Amino acid sequence: MFRSILSGDMPRSAVLSILLAVIFACLALAPFLFPGVRSIDTAARICVFIALVASYDLLLGYGGIVSFAHTMFFGIGAYGVALALTHMGRGFDAIIVGSVAGAVVAALLALLIGLFSLRVRAIFFAMITLAVASAVAVLASQLSGLTGGEDGLTFKLPRELGPAFKFGTEMFGGELFGVKLNGKLLAYYLVFAGALVLFLLLLRIVNSPFGRVLQAIRENDFRAEAIGYRVVYYRVAATCLSAAAAALAGSLYAIWLRYVGPDTTLSMELMIDILLMVVIGGMGTMYGAVIGATLFVLAQNYLQNLMGAASGLVEGIPVLPQLLSADRWLLWLGVLFILSVYFFPTGIVGRLRSGR
């Protein structure tokens, strides 16, 4: 059964299997295991970034295509939901229309970029995507009448996804294991289910004949072309699928935040974060997206607090309190990244599988 759900792509490592099972259980039961606003927000972000990083790994890890426009597609999906909820009202029909429209627009834009750019060498394609993504980010900042400009858009979700909505009052008294049964809980599980479905779909794609051809093109595009595969068509198709998946992940992010702005969905810093997650987890392994996104988001949210606690413990020892100061958490995050690349050159998943 699990083999079928995972499209035959088993972890192939006992340690990796345990890690994936623990992450899945923690995310599935996050509201009950880790009560608190910050914990649930962290879990929701992990879910969204797992789907986003997996969609980028389809492009980079399996197709060998370097693109800097992935946050653009992510932002298109987020703005699609925001605009639909703003102009159509706070209904589930607006969420569906916004999500589908965002995915379609992202796929069409990826098609245009791919058809005109994927015939050139990788570095030139990367530069073209960077230029297009930068232009879209500038447009989102300047078209304040449509996108809210630098301030972004704040919108209302359907009442059923808001904290004021209560359910289970008759059966459970409005609480289950000390957790309030409200719309915020439903919103979390909507994000969790959406990210899970996206991840499993991407896993199915990379383990299909299409995914095998992509890997062949990544290894040797001249040989793939020689045996009859239209390399450009496969690369364009991969770019469109990756863009649509990223847009759907952006829709989930907008639903969770109830806000969309250039800094949250279109920034270059976010693109760098996605690259780091792919490298840490392992390129060309969908499970790398799970490990990389989980570790990176946890580090972003809790490393500063851990360093503050560590700094207090070594108080009185020369130099160490300054080195472990919470203000230097970005420095240590960079050090951790360098160490992970040095000790895990194929990513954590690649190392675990080879260690088997």
Image (spheres, rainbow, N blue to C red):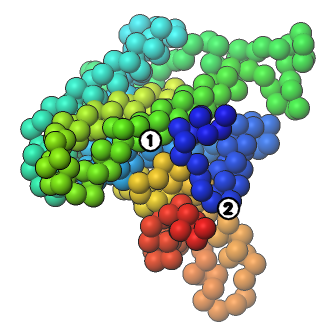
Q: Earlier in the sequence, mark 2 or mark 1?
A: 2
Q: Quadrant of the C terminus?
A: bottom right
Q: Residue at x 55, y 42 (%)?
A: 8
Disc marking residue 46? none
Q: Nearer the viewer, residue 74 or 303?
A: 74
Is residue 271 shown left or right of residue 36? left
Which residue, given by chain and number where applicable, does mark 2 sit on? Answer: 15
The correct choice, above or below, for 147 with respect to 333 in the image is above
Query: Which numbered mark, 2 or 1, is in the foreground of this view?
Result: 1
| Residue 355 visible | yes
Q: Is residue 115 left or right of residue 288?
A: left
Residue 39, given in percent of the width and then of the height, sits at: 69, 44
Residue depicted at x 10% and y 46%: 119
Question: In this view of the protein, can residue 68 be seen by the observer?
Answer: no
Residue that numbered label 1 is attached to: 207
Distance of label 2 from label 1 (alpha carbons): 22 Å
Residue 144 versus residue 348 in the image, above or below: above
